[in-house]
Amino acid sequence: MSEAVVDPLSRLTAQMRLAGARVGLGELLTAHRALAAVDCTSRADAKRALRAVLCSRREDLEHFEHAFLSVFGDEHPPGREQPLNELGTVEREALPRSGMSGAAPEQATGAEDPAPVPAAWSELELLRVKDFAHYSDAEMAQARELIARLAHRGPTRISRRTRPVRRRGHEPDLRRLLRASLRTVGVPVHRHWRAPSVRQRPVVLVCDVSGSMEPYARVLLQYLHACVAARRRVEAFAFGTRLTRITHELSGRDHDRALDRAAEAVVDFAGGTRIGAALAELNRAHGRRLGRGAVVVILSDGWDRGDPDVLGLEMQRLRRSAHRLVWLNPLAAHPDYEPLTRGMRAAVPHTDELLAGNSLASLEQLAETLEEM
């Protein structure tokens, strides 16, 4: 498949996904097939086709417009058809045709090759893959809104409680059915149904604020605050040489005041690290508050000065009570990374997912992982 098609569409879907739209690999493949079904030399036809397959909700329309403008440039002057970047010069055979019957329409040809529209670079896309350790203060403020969007995405579970639904559910709603039958002389003409409701699963966030994590802790604490403000049943902890519960300090919508309260509460900021002792206090002092069935996310690079046997034992204990255990390690972003430190070697056998926690792209991967749990 031609890079002239793959690269722009990949950037378009990445921009929409970063803005909060539900766009995945299936929608990307459908977008390729949609372009094969229309005239790619027409910017308007290609835009309408992409909008039809990439927007599944009303709020996605605005995300699509911003992403389309960012990837393919400004709109052309009225009354003049302009190609969609380089897509107009791509042969139709380079596009996927699965799911189509018959021959594809012939490609429109003109006397002259149309002038390409210059693609606009995206500052948000560069910020998305940039390492947190290299963020400036302005970039941290710019990333705050993106982090807040990711914080709304989290794990869910099916509740045993049911709720009324309009279409057929798992079981009939007998109470409503009997009440409705009183209007029709006892004949159950109008049917009513109930289905299980979906509830948020508890999330526990444990952030390492030791000296080795200092370049990442300031951004990761923003993520903790966004999660506490956006979702129910979220517990936030910070640890260095000791564990500190900062859920109350991070509550509230004022971002700066919340982080100031958390910084005052954490007395061992930028100090040493004892992960095993911190998890032992989490299991024993806060186990009743956390309950069973929570998703535990540990954000740490794994550099531990404590006993690795204690860490392994406490990880095993935590894994038994948690629904899933996810470890975010900024060092895991390197392609040659291997968990060779004492702390990581003790923790990895009890971890369900080991992800990188060094960029917005890694937090987006975390959000997708949580939604699948």
Image (cartoon, helix red, strand yellow):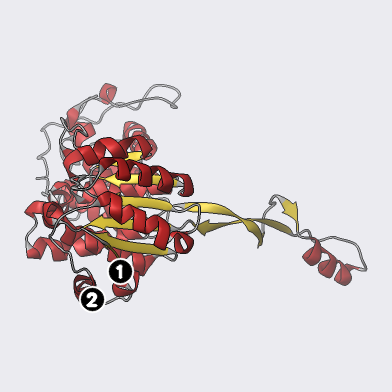
Q: Count every numbered label the image shows and give the total.
A: 2
The answer to whether the residue labelled 2 contacts the one labelled 1, judged by CB atoms less than 8 Å apart, is yes
Q: Which residue is mark 1?
A: 246
Image quarter of the C terminus: top left
Residue 92 in the image: state x and y as whole percent: 27, 25
Residue 36 in the image: state x and y as whole percent: 33, 31
Name which residue lies at 25% across and 39% down.
Answer: 344
| 58 vs 331, nearest the viewer | 331
370 vs 197, left or right, is left
For residue 261, which numbered disc appears in the image?
2
| 270 vs 296, nearest the viewer | 270
Q: Is residue 217 above or below residue 346?
A: below
Name which residue lies at 24% across and 46% down.
Answer: 362
Residue 120 in the image: state x and y as whole percent: 11, 49
Name which residue lies at 24% across and 31% down.
Answer: 108
| 322 vs 99, nearest the viewer | 322
- Any part of residue 239 in sight: yes
- Any part of residue 38 in sight: no
Query: What is the CA distance from the residue labelled 2 to the residue labelled 1?
Result: 9 Å
